[in-house]
Image (tube, rainbow, N blue to C red):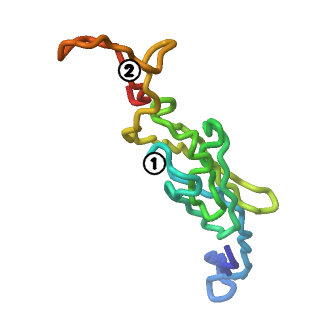
Amino acid sequence: FGTATITVTVTDDGGIANAGTNQVSINFDVVINPVNDVPTITDITISVDENSIDGVEVGTMIFNDVDSNNLSFSITSGNTNDAFSISNTRLISVNMGSELNNENIASYDRISKVEDDAVIPLSTEANVTITVNDINDAPIDIVVGVYESVIFINDPTPAGAFLRTIRAVDEDF
């Protein structure tokens, strides 16, 4: 944007007047007004470990705004249970770490938006895929029997005799 000065000159053969040529020139300015350009944002794929604590930084949105407007970032869809947040510094963080469980949701396909603060704001969206890395979870329970927490055996009981089935509960399986 800015101003450009343009000169237009017209010449004809003029016949016999003015030594055979007639010429006139005029200068004028062209003012180019700036317009608001749409900011751009790039699709990204990132990952985070399941059970990460709230506030863990996951990634950063990549953007460009040729107008250097103030920008705001938001998540417009795909953020199941508010698992993630995005700041106006374009940083993606864990918002609800308790929701990050690979056995329940292995990947979040979100849409993030960047919007400028022009008089008529412009925005664009990008796909953000966040893969939840499966981490080995510790077993969460041991099941001995339906009603029994004590196992009774007769004396003598031979070595290797079957006593009871004991089952461990592990979210990974």
Picture coordinates of residue 126, whole percent (x, y): 56, 46
**Which residue of the protein is positioned furthest toward the front in this rendering?**
155
Q: Amino acid at mark 1?
A: Val
* Residue position marked by numbered label 2 in the rendering: 167
Picture coordinates of residue 112, whole percent (x, y): 61, 47
**Frontmost residue, 162 versus 170:** 162
Within 10 Å of disc 2 (Cα), the crowding (few <14, some 14-19, many 20+) is few
Judged left or right of residue 60, residue 85 is right
The secondary element bearing badge 2 is classed as strand
Query: In the picture shown, does residue 18 fall above or below 8?
Result: below
Q: Amino acid at mark 2?
A: Arg
Picture coordinates of residue 158, whole percent (x, y): 18, 13
- Quarter placement of the N terminus: bottom right
Within 10 Å of disc 1 (Cα), the crowding (few <14, some 14-19, many 20+) is some
* Residue position marked by numbered label 1 in the rendering: 48
- Taking the spot 55% from the left edge, 59% from the top edge, the residue there is 63
Residue 26, image quadrant: bottom right
Q: Earlier in the sequence, mark 1 or mark 2?
A: 1
Marks 1 and 2: which is nearer the front?
A: 2
- Taking the spot 45% from the left edge, 41% from the top edge, the residue there is 132
- Taking the spot 62% from the left edge, 83% from the top edge, the residue there is 20
Work out how far the residue at label 1 is from the one at label 2, CA to CA, in angstroms.
31 Å
Q: Are marks 1 and 2 in contact (CB under 8 Å)?
A: no
